[in-house]
Image (cartoon, helix red, strand yellow):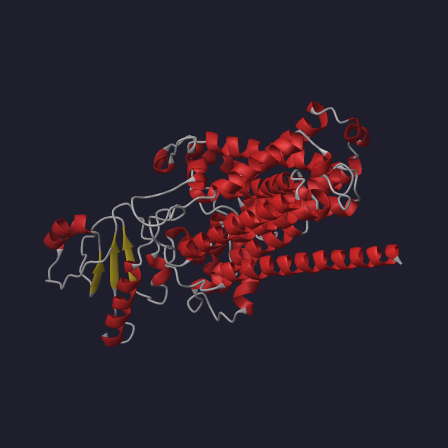
Amino acid sequence: MGRLRLRRISVQSKQLRQLIVAIGVAAIVVGAAWLRFSELGARPMHGDEANQAVKTGALYDQGEYRYDPFEHHGPTLYYFALPVLRLTGAASYEKAQARQYRLVPAVFGFGLVLLTLGLWRLLGPWPAFWAGAFTAISHVMVYYSRYYIQEMLFTFFALCFIVCAWKILQGRGTWWAVLGGIAAGLLHATKETGIFVFAAGILAYVVVVFVSRDAEQRERGWKPRPLVVFVACGLLVSVAFFSSFFTWWRGPLDSLLTYWHYVRRAEGQGSSGLHDKPFYYYFTLLSYTYRMVGPRWTEAPVLLLALVGAFLAWRPCKRLTTEEAQPSPHLFARFVSVYAWSLALLLSALPYKTPWNLLVFYQPMLLLAGLGLHGIIKCMHKRWLRLVAITLTLGVLYVMARQTRLGTTVYAADVRNPYVYAHTSTDLVHLVERVETIRAIAPADALQINIIKPDGDYWPLPWYLRSFHRVGYWPAIPEKPDAPLLIAPPELAEALSAALRDKYFVEMYS
């Protein structure tokens, strides 16, 4: 009778734990969706977003795409946007709204959370749970999941590639090679810096297998068939996208020639020098940012836990592994640790830096943070200490979630936000509203607008004025600048006034 009662209590306790985990996973999934999909159209379009939207619009309306080896990155963003625009009822590029475009990175950002939770066999159930929670509410992960640029797709494909590559190297079946090849092809067709991901992945495998002297891993060896399938699928996918699905054969060649241009950009030559940052730039953004007034931004707890996770991966103990995990989960943890930190150091060594570039190495650090947190909790023998650690963790998660919500709403276009980078002022929206008001009283389709900007950077005005059909963009004051409406920077005021034949009513916008 006593045994039966103990067994019943044990079963009930297990069911309670499963219920708590199910509620936790549901909360992560719902929270991730809410943070990524709510109010997608509220923030003004960044110049880069507008640029990508115009490129997508040409593909959507005319069915034409040609890869540009100098700008814009790869084509996957545009092609994945097509079904989203159709499903959300966009009649044309002119009728599409910002939120419809931003649904694309939001879907991939949400998918990244689901994929992280799905790594419970590789990481262990609890490390995957905590990593999923960190990914769901990370400020930088959420912010750029709401940004119509390539980065969130790139980060998603990078994780898919790393997981599939590890499975292949573990001697798994051909289907993993097919999936891994597709992921590698999509990664290359999304952004040129995919070569850094490939390099970091190769380095991580070499270190884990040879430096750690893991005999079991070496005995599996390299099986040629999966690798051939992997390479073939990767090439097919990459060529398909760069060739505009086999209609523009210059594209695949340009996807290779573009690296000469990116070498110059990485060295800070030309206009790229504007984006030169010190080595520690990415870690400063993540660890602590405070710009005189406003909130103090930090994801330092995650960085510290990522360091702990890397340490525990290379100093394995029984508490780090779980019965539910596959044999030797510490090998994958070692692989991720070398991959994440080598990629972080590689990208930090390049002078050219923008905030969104950190996503691809920060995402595997979130996996390490889950490992680190689980390792700390498991090393606590007292139940009350574990409860204290979990309570503190939930408090940190709440603070991070609140910070993220502020960063994607109140401070979404505010320079005090560390991830607002050369962003469009909210006052530009007022300018566009003013132009719309003027059009309402102008003769039908007769409003000509001349936009004059010396450096030729008119963005995001081409997006906001996409429904106007008589807009001229000038990198210098034209011979006859007069038009019903002129838009120009203040530094041209004196020279422009001298060239105008009429007097104009002047308004100022930032």
Residue appearing at x 57%, y 38% in the figure: 306
* In-image side of 492 versus 270 (left or right): left
Q: Nearer the viewer, residue 190 or 497?
A: 190
Q: Who's the residue at 45% across and 67% down the image?
A: 96
User: Seen in the image, is 285 located left or right of residue 375?
Assistant: left
Total number of numbered labels?
A: 0
Residue nearest the viewer, comparing 314 with 494: 314
At a point 52% along the width and 52% down the height, the residue shown is 137
Seen in the image, is 87 located left or right of residue 436? right
In this rendering, the answer to whether 279 lies above or below 325 is: above
Q: Position of residue 442 (x, y in %)?
A: 23, 74
- Which of 301/240 is in front? 301
Q: Nearer the viewer, residue 379 or 23?
A: 379
**Is residue 254 at all visible to an observer of this figure?**
no
For the N terminus, the quadrant is bottom right
Residue 86 quadrant: bottom right
Q: Is residue 176 visible?
A: yes
Percent coordinates x, y for residue 163 in the rendering:
68, 43
Q: Which quarter of the picture shows residue 278?
A: top left
Quarter residue 438 falls in: bottom left
Q: Residue at x 66, y 29 (%)?
A: 314
Q: Which quadrant does the C terminus fall into?
A: bottom left
Counting from the top left corner in percent of width and height, residue 232 is at 71, 42
Question: Residue farthest to the front?
Answer: 2
List x then y, in percent, for residue 488.
22, 54
Looking at this view, name the residue that lies furthest to the right.
Answer: 1
